[in-house]
Image (cartoon, rainbow, N blue to C red):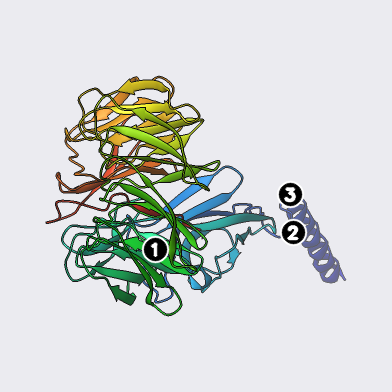
Amino acid sequence: MTKPLVHATCLVLSFTVLLACTKHNPVSTTAPNTPPLSSVKEIDSFTVYNAADEPFSPSAIFVTDLPGDTILVSLPPNVYLNDLIPVFTFKGKSVYPVSGTVVNLSTPVYFTVNAEDGSQINYTVIVTTRGAVYFGTSDGRMLMLDAGTGNQIWMDSLGGGFQYSIPQLLGSNIYTASTSGMLYGLDYVAGVVKWQFQAGGPVATTPTMAGGFVYFGCNDDNFYVVDLSLWSLYWQFPTGGPVQSQPLAVGDTAYFASGDGNLYKVNAYSRSATWQFNLSGPVGSASPQINKGTVYIGSRSDSLYAVDAVTGMLKWSAKADGLSLENSTPTLADSTVYIGAESGSLFAFNDSTGGVRWKSLPGVSVSDQPFVYNNSVYVTAGDGNLYAVDAGSGVKKWSVAGLYANGSGPIVANGVLYVGGGGSGYFYAIDPANGNVKWKFSTGSATSLSYRPLYIPGY
């Protein structure tokens, strides 16, 4: 009877020991600790490929990160934005739109980055294209450059002849002329010649488009009116000298000066001259400008003339100290007429009376058209320099030596001064505030460039 009791006692002791072991070494009934879900969500890098899945060159694309999770992308001119391919890296769980897919970036696009914890961040991607500058050369080429970088977009050889002409934009076409006597229309995106018209002599002026016509002068002593829709001669008006003055055209009416010493007002529809005014001296490349019913033009007679645009009667004339004004087109700004003298000096005249406000750069030949921007007047000069003078006082602010513009004048567009330096062999982008060169483009064998470049903004 004792053996069963002993056996039971052992079982009790064993159970007691098990309970004791369980009490001092409990078994966990919960899952191991796990790290919290990450809230990281950001785009690290961003670039853009074109529709052919080719990246733009590193110098052609600018990407800027701004506060507020905005990414600005700047691309070369004339890039089609509707089918670009954003390629980027990011931290987070996912992103939409997905990297490497075709996206329409013609308007701002939100890229949503999702974190592991379910939080999100939206990046606004804004893509723009930069502006472009166009100019012709003395060796018969027309070029389009990226205005932001100076990289060449295209170059079209136009068969020889000087490209003095300032390129003109109308619709999708750029119009220019050559001393070969050819007037060209080119597609402004691709540079392909779409049409051409042959004049009877060298064309050393700039065509003007208005009222369905192209107006331009020629060294064969004629003034031409070409029908834009037919690209055929509409009317030819003879003068007594070469016409190198860019016409000022309003609808079917045009004003221009000639080497015969006359200022003309002609009407295309009536095919006749409304009036002519004698300037007492020949006019070269100077072109008339109009403001508040008054036409302003200079001549070799050393005078600036203000002529009534309707009647052709003289309002006033002002002397330029015996200096020729035959090649400088006047610029009007803030009731002042700015004009350069080829035999020396830059003048500012009162536009109502002809009184001299100031005379600057004495002895320095100025034959291009002054450009006024931000209270400064910019001109190139025969001594090879580019000058900036105060518009109110004529005091020189700064100069850049060694450009040798050879008749090319500056423009300021989008806060940058662009000017050709045919004699130095470069086309320049310059800071208008201080004259510092931002970039320069080698023009090769050209010795002269267009009277001025054309700037077309991006989008």
Whether residue 428 is situated above or below residue 247 in the rendered picture:
above
- Judging by the rendered image, the residue that carries numbered circle 2 is 30
Q: Specify the quadrant of the image occupied by residue 6.
A: bottom right
Residue drawn at the location 37% of the way across and 52% of the way down: 256
Furthest residue toward bottom: 230
Neighbour tally class for label 1: few under 14, some 14-19, many 20 plus, Cα within 10 Å = many
Mark 3: amino acid:
His
Which mark sits nearer the N-terminus, 3 or 2?
3
User: Could you say whether the residue bearing mark 3 is in a helix, strand or loop?
Assistant: helix
Could you tell me if the residues under marks 2 and 1 are in contact, i.e. CB atoms within 8 Å? no
Query: From where the camera sits, is residue 335 visible?
Result: yes
Please state if 87 lies on the left or on the right of 319 as rendered: right
- Judging by the rendered image, the residue that carries numbered circle 1 is 215
Label 3 vs label 1, nearer the camera: 1
- Between 431 and 374, the one nearer to me in the picture: 374
Which mark sits nearer the N-terminus, 3 or 1?
3
Mark 1: amino acid:
Tyr
In space, the residues marked 2 and 1 are separated at their CA atoms by 91 Å
In space, the residues marked 3 and 1 are separated at their CA atoms by 106 Å
**Where residue 340 sits: x, y (%)?**
30, 34
Q: Quadrant of the N terminus?
A: bottom right
**Where residue 354 sits: x, y (%)?**
43, 27
Mark 2: amino acid:
Thr
